[in-house]
Image: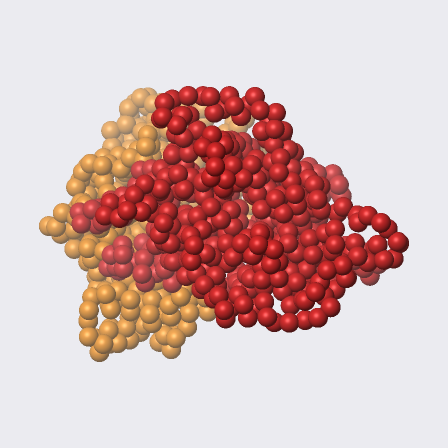
Chain colours: A orange, B red
Amino acid sequence: MIVDIQGVVKRFGSVTAVSAVDLTVADGELFTLLGPSGCGKTTLLRLLAGFYQPDAGTIRFGDRVVNGLPPYERRIGMVFQNYALWPHMTVADNIGYGLRLRRLSAEQVAERLREGLRKVNLVGFEARYPGQLSGGQQQRVALARALVLNPDILLLDEPLSNLDAKIRIQVRAEIRRLQQQLRITTIYVTHDQEEALSLSDRVAVMRDGHVLQVGPPRELYERPRTRFVADFVGTNNLVSGEVQGAGAGGGGELLVRTALGSLRAIAAGAVTGRCVLAVRPENVAVGAAGADGGNQVAGRVSLVSYLGNTLRYDVETKPGLVLKADIRDPWHHEPLPVGRPVTLSFPPSVTLALSDDA
Amino acid sequence: MRSQGVGLAVGVGLIWAFLILFLVYPLGRIFYDAVTDEAGRWTLANFHTFFTDRFYLRSLWHSLILGVATVITSSVLGIAVAFLLVRYDFVGRNLFSFLTMIPIISPPLVGVLGFTFILGRAGTVNVLLMEAFDMLRPVNFLYGIHGVVLVETLHLFPMITLNVVDALGKVDPSLEEAAESVGARGWSKLWRVTLPLTTPGYVAGALLVFIWTFSDFATPLVLGVQDLLAPQAYLNIVQFVDRRIFRMGIVISALMVLLAILFLLAARHYVAIKDYSSLSYSRIARRRLSPGRQLLVVTFLSALLLLSFIPYIGVTLASVGKGWALTPLPVAYTLQYYERVIVETPKYVLNSFLYSGIAVVICILVGVPIAWLLGRSTVPGRGALDAVNTLILAVPGTAIGIAYIRAFHFDLPGFDRGLTSFWIIMPLVLAVRRLPYTVRGSFASLLLVHRSLEEAAASVGASVARTFRDVTLPLIWKGILVGSLFSFMTSLQEASAVLFLALGGWESITNGIFAFYIAGSANEAAALGVILILVAAISVAIINRMAGTRMGGVFG
């Protein structure tokens, strides 16, 4: 089922939580709304669920306009951040409640209940109450409750934020597996960019009620279009600058004047005048580069953080301007002491010139 | 959606119609009476009369002093008991925790009667003292303002205890630990951190104590104190001779309502009365006291409880005692008084249960929807609904009784009598008086039900009504039940409002107690009192079991 959002606005008093959002989610897609708290992602999800009604704009599920419909007439399934399992009902009653509301026969209810329990690996837990389940199990009951109705759209509101790190990855994989298996159009809200990247077909990054960029995870990570997206998705070194002209490498390369000298960069779109350069720490090498050269910056190590799978150097290049550089194989690397002068180098192909939306 | 909107509008309309007809209109009526004369002309002469009459002014002054004095004494006892119960562990703590709630359920009139049996001029204590010390005159424990303060304090201090216990339970221990971490200890920590945090709960309790004392006319009258506002209002109304004095009774009750609203607003200004900001009760580590201190605490609590239980002892003895005059204890025992009030004239008990039962049903029908509107809906006028609900707690029962007499005296269409001549007026006035308990009980438990539980039901296809039935109601019925049981119990005990509305043949238990007492048959009054106390004790035991000691939320 295609979800089509056109010019949707939602205000709370003088605050505009969602302002003129246009989005189209393809059939069977897992689409994520990503952004910091207060960006309007949950409001947008609740507009889709029908808990809020938009002040302007149209929401379509397929060719059905759902504006004005209450949640119980939208054929959605929703998973809540706090699970929202009814504490006075057993697992079976929680999952079967929606089925019984649809006046299915007892056999049908039982059959679909069994099927739902099997889907989320909770066979045998029917008679338990939510209070007797672990967090991960509760989340799976919530998922089964939403899926057992064969909804047109599955809505997930930060479903993993209350789980431990290990369980989170496990349930994350489970959600993805089920979603692919059922090919159900799914809209997923999270503030965790790693979760968004690992799960989604496409991601919309939101800020202040606006959608800044929509794209597949790899595009968002490797080709952010604005400073905010570059900063919010993953870790980036950001350096403000001004476009001087074409770079030496040709092929649309730019030469940008920064506090660290003139640097060569590539641009995704048209960037002129004031801009910001973004370089991921994993693309910054510690030590002088070879013949090609690319960009080179001198500085002193100010902090060494050992993270297990990486080792991160904070290098102060100018007073107050720190660049991060990752060593991706710390097993075979002897850490440099703090204060040691180093040269950082990064090729123009990973140096992105972005419009500055700060 | 549209039909639901219409249903909602009709429901809200019905609730307001009820509140306006049975609360706003009657109160408006006594204010109208207070500023008009017999011919219906607008005048301030009534207030002029009040404020130039030395006796009335003295009554006002004494009423205020009585209220303040009772608040002070109840606070000292109530706060001390609350701290002991919450913060320390000692032998019998749980038992004391239950027993300290008991005095509050003593029915208004019965309490003071019980005191007179034990501490009165010819009461047990004086008889013993006079025999032991050859005294010629009894000690005056009770008759006078000091006696009213004593009786009201021993009756009402649990109101403070309950509210402070509740507030203390909500104080996050880390706040006190933070105070300790910066060096605050002992009294400094108590004074600067702990007490301010419990202020909202305390003020709510203190306000109720003040208004209760301020509007109680039965206790002062039994103790021979007449120069107070409430007894004056009562005496002026029940004499049906002088129209002018009758009107002054109305003026006094209007004044009492005004003052009560004023105190309510003042308290509200100082702290938000309705403080549900934190609903999570923290686990409290109780300090185990040394044996010596335990002895001290247990002695203090036992002495306090012994005093508070005087009325129960007195009333119980009087209900089974024969020939109890000028002797420390009755000379013979009998069940004849119970026979008279239960078998011979069962109407008091039957009527009371009927009225309170109907009142609770009305409370639930009106109160639960109000709680839902306050907690879940966005309909306009919720602020006003909340204000009216809080106002009911503050309006003196005396004033409501008088207001009903004035407001519903006119002949009903199709009848040659007014509503005041039908017994249904009794459950109605009880329902209005006790509505806040049901609303608060339901509202508090509604707040504990996370909204996403209801949204989840909507997301799987349940309508609003269906969601309420299948999800909300099963999660809040305990709160509704606790609030309703409390409404029921206090309805049975209501004296001030129903004493004005008593109908021949349709009297309630409290009417009966008053009638027997005035007719000089204190034993029958006592027997009825014991019945009330028993019902109340059972109710409290059930409430206590279901809600723990967290009745503060209902009272506050």
In the figure, B383 relative to A89: above or below?
above
Viewport quadrant of the N terminus of chain A: bottom left
Query: Residue B254: image x %, image y %?
Result: 47, 33
For residue B145, side relative to residue A241 (left or right): right
Residue drawn at (68%, 71%) of the image? B333
User: Outermost residue toward the left?
Assistant: A63
**Quarter where residue A271 is shown:** top left
Residue drawn at (58%, 59%) of the image? B525
Residue drawn at (47%, 46%) of the image? B500
For residue A28, side relative to residue B527 (left or right): left
User: Outermost residue toward the front?
Assistant: B241
Residue B499 seen anywhere in this rendered image of the structure: yes
Residue drawn at (65%, 37%) of the image? B66
* Count of labels in the image: 0
Of A37 and A278, the residue lying toward us: A37
For residue A209, side relative to residue B119 (left or right): left
Of B231 and A165, the residue lying toward us: B231
Of B176 and B400, the residue lying toward us: B400
Viewport quadrant of the C terminus of chain A: top left
Of A12 and B186, the residue lying toward us: B186
Query: Residue B56: image x %, image y %?
Result: 58, 29
